[in-house]
Image: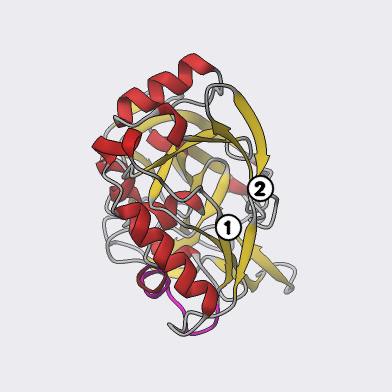
Amino acid sequence: MVSIFKTPSRLNVLTLVSLSFCLTTDIAAVFERFPLTSLDYSDKNLKKVREEVKHNLHVSISNLENKDLVPLRFFVYKVKANDNFFKIMARTGMDLDTLSSVNELSSPHDIYPGMELLIPNMRGSYDAEEPRSDSMTRKRVASKARISQKFIYYDDRRNAWFVPGRGLQKEEKSFFYGMAFIDPLAEEGTVSSNFGRRRDPFTKKSTFHGGIDLAADLGTPVYASADGIVSYSNEKGGYGNLIVLKHNLGYETRYGHLSKLLVDAGTRVKKGELIGKVGSTGRATGNHLHFEVLRNSQKQRPVFHGHI
C-alpha cells in the first residue's frame, strides 16, 4: 500500500554533532569525530574508544566534582554485513542504553550494512524530557541524574541532554526489546508482506513498505498493540479505514484497511483492547491488517512477540 503520511528520512548521523558543553556559561562546540573502521581489537581507534570508555566508567558518579572525565567525543562506525547490535555493543565497550539512545534505535534490528553509528567515548543516554537548553533546565537535569552540571552536554541536533552514566528507563527498554507491543491480531494473522523494500502489488515496482501486512479473515478482531490514546479513527486514502494510536516516548501505531472502526478519536485504550475489525478498505488486494510502528514520526520495523 502507499502511505499518505509524510515519512521523514532517518537522522543522518554524519551531521556534525553540535553540542553545548555545559560549564558556568553555555559554550557552543563542535566535537571531533574519528573514523572507526574495524571492530578488530588490534584497531588503533577501537583501542582508544575502549580505553576512554573504561576510564570514564571508573569515574564515580558521586565523586564527579573531584574526578576528570575524558571530554565527550564520538567515533563513527559503518556497519558491516556480519555485524549485529550486540556484537558492536560488546566490541566498543558500550551498553544497550548508550548505543540505542545515541543512535535513536528503536530495536536491535534497526541497524543494517552501510549504516553509520555514533560511538561515544562514555556511557550515558539522552534525557529527552527536558528539551530546553537554559541554565535552569541544566540544573534540573543534573539534579535528577545526581551529577555535576559541568559534566552534562546539550545536543542541539537532538534537543536533548546527554547525561554520562544515565541509563534508559524501564519503559524505554521494554519498547526497545519489543516487549511493549503485542500482536494486534493475537496470532490470528499471517505475515503476507514484511517491512522494507518489496514489489508493489499494484505498480509491480520496487517500493518501500513502511509496515507489515497481516493476512486474516474479514472481521478478525484487531487489538491495541500497547496502551495509548486514539489520535485518528476515520477513512484515510490508501489506508482505507485507519486507526492511529499515540503511545509514550514518541511511539505511534497505525492500523489500516479496517472493515470496522470501534473506537473514536480521543479515547484512551489499554493494550489488548478491541479497536477494530480486519477488512480490505483503501488500497488493498485482499483482507489484511496493515500495521505500522513509528517513533518520533519515523517508521520502524514492527517488533513484538512472535514477529521481528
Residue 296 is situated, as x and y percent measured from the top left of the image, at 54, 40
Tags 2 and 1 in contact by the CB under 8 Å rule? yes
Question: Which residue extends farthest front?
Answer: 66
**Label 2 sits on residue:** 7
Q: Position of residue 124 (x, y in %)?
A: 38, 47
Q: Residues within 10 Å of mark 2 (few under 14, many from 20)?
A: few
Q: Nearer the viewer, residue 26 or 296?
A: 26
Q: Amino acid at mark 2?
A: Thr
Q: Is residue 85 magenta?
A: yes
Dot 2 or dot 1: first in sequence order is 2
Identify the residue at image location x=32%, y=37%: 66
| Residue located at (67% from left, 33% from top) | 28
Colour setting: secondary structure
Relative horizontal placement of residue 146, taking residue 241 as reference (left or right)? left
Residue range (magenta)? 80-89
Residue 67, position in %: x, y? Answer: 34, 42
Q: Is residue 215 visible?
A: no
**Element class at badge 2:** loop
- Residue 32 appears in which quarter of the rendering? bottom right
Q: Position of residue 196 (x, y in %)?
A: 58, 67
Q: Quadrant of the N terminus?
A: bottom right
Q: Between residue 134 and residue 72, name the one nearer to us.
A: 72
Q: CA distance from mark 2 to mark 1?
A: 9 Å
Please state the total of marks drawn on the protein image. 2
Crowding at dot 1, Cα within 10 Å, few <14 / some 14-19 / many 20+, comes out as many
What residue is pinned by disc 1? 210
**248 to the left or right of 300:** left
Front: mark 2 or 1: 2
Q: Secondary structure at mark 1?
A: loop
User: Does the stretch in magenta take in 65?
Assistant: no
Residue at 62% in and 64% down: 34
